[in-house]
Amino acid sequence: MPRIVGVDVPNNKPSWIALTYIHGIGAYTAKQILAEVGIDGAVRAGKLSEDEVSRISQIIDRDYEVEGPLRRRVSQNIVRLKDIACYRGMRHRRGLPVRGQQTQSNARTRKGKKKTVAGKKGVKELR
C-alpha cells in the first residue's frame, strides 16, 4: 500500500480513486493532481513508483489542505458558529439539519432514533 500524506491508499484501485481515500481530495481534485504529475489515472496505485508517490505527496502538501488540518479547520468553523449563536450554530448545537432540509418527516440521520411520545388520552365522561 502506498502511503501518501499519512494515509494508506489501496493497491488494487486505480490511482485517481485511491487518492480519494485522503480526506479533502475528491474525484476532480485527484484527477487534477495526477494530470499535474503526468500519471495516467487508470494506473493501479500499487504500480506507482516511489518517485511518483513522492511527487504526488509534494503537490498535495504544497497546494491542498487535507486530513488533520482540514478536519481541525472545519470543527473550528462549527465551534465559531455555535459561539456567535447564529442560526446555523443553533442548528448544530441542537443536532438538527443545518442546510434547510425538512424535519417534520425526515432528518433521522441528524435527529437520531425516533423517540415515541405518547398521544393524548381522551377524557372519559363521568356518569
Image: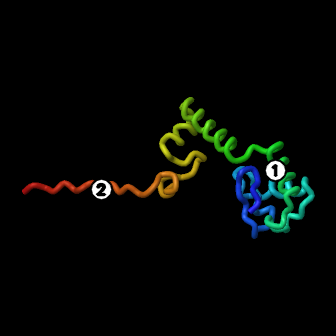
Q: Residues within 10 Å of mark 2 (few under 14, many from 20)?
A: few
Q: Amino acid at mark 2?
A: Gly
Q: Residues within 10 Å of mark 1 (few under 14, many from 20)?
A: some
Which residue is more in the foreground, 3 or 37?
3
Answer above or below: position of 118 versus 77: below
Quarter of the picture containing the N terminus is bottom right
Name the N-terminal-most of marks 1 and 2.
Answer: 1
Answer above or below: position of 66 versus 85: below
Q: Which residue is mark 1?
A: 57
At 73% from the left edge and 60% from the top edge, which residue is drawn?
9
Residue found at the far front of this picture: 50
Q: Amino acid at mark 1?
A: Ser
- The quarter holding residue 39 reads bottom right
At 61% from the left edge and 40% from the top edge, which residue is drawn?
75
Which element type, helix, strand or loop, lies under badge 2? loop
Q: Is residue 14 left or right of residue 105?
A: right
Distance (Cα) linking label 1 and label 2: 59 Å
Residue found at the far right of this picture: 38
Q: Is residue 112 left or right of residue 99?
A: left
Quarter of the picture containing the C terminus is bottom left
Instruction: Give the number of the disc on residue 119.
Output: 2
Residue found at the far top of this picture: 84
At 81% from the left edge and 56% from the top edge, which residue is drawn?
30
Residue found at the far bottom of this picture: 12
Answer above or below: position of 108 versus 99: below
Percent position of residue 98, x then y: 57, 45
